[in-house]
Amino acid sequence: MTAIMLTRIDNSRNMARLYKLDVQPTLFGGWTLVREWGRIGQSGTVRAEFHASRGRADLALILHWVRRIKRGYR
């Protein structure tokens, strides 16, 4: 599994943000999209979305990835 790590840094606005996406298997045969976001260097917010198949979890990952790119993350 490969995690995607995006950052958004704007020194003029004192902004240093991190957004991490990761797909992981569950113990019961499903898949989980784990999202973590917050300020770089501090503990962030973590949310898990459960999906029945790897394909659906990957699709959700791509949708979140595209949204973050549109908001200026790289």
Image (cartoon, rainbow, N blue to C red):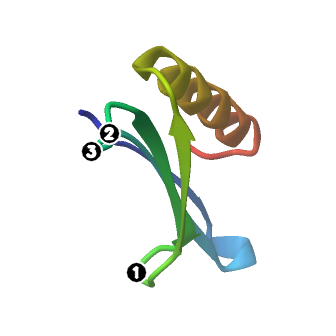
Please state the horizontal and vertical placement of residue 20, each as a whole percent of the image.
Answer: 46, 52
Q: Amino acid at mark 2?
A: Phe
Are dots 2 and 1 in contact, CB under 8 Å?
Answer: no
Res 8 → quadrant? bottom right
Q: Please give the name of the residue rendered at 57% of the width and 25% of the height, measured from the top-left corner.
A: 62
Image point 44% across, 42% down: which residue?
32
Q: Which mark is residue 27?
A: 3
Please report the residue visible at 59 percent of the width from the left and 34 percent of the height from the top: 65
Given contact means CB atoms under 8 Å apart, are the residues at marks 3 and 2 in contact?
A: yes
Position of residue 1 in the picture relative to residue 6 (left or right): left
What is the three-letter code of the residue carrying label 1?
Gly
Q: Looking at the image, is 9 positioned above or below residue 49? A: below
Mark closer to the chain start, 3 or 1: 3
Disc 1 residue crowd, few under 14, some 14–19, many 20+, Cα 10 Å: few
Which type of secondary structure does the marked residue at label 3 adopt? loop
Closest to the camera, between mark 3 and mark 1, is 3
Q: Which residue is mark 1?
A: 41
Q: Secondary structure at mark 1?
A: loop
Q: Are marks 3 and 1 in contact (CB under 8 Å)?
A: no
Task: Look at mark 2 in the image and give the residue it sits on.
Answer: 28
Pick the front one: 70 or 28: 28
* Residue under the point 72% across and 36% down: 67
Report the quarter where the N terminus lies: top left
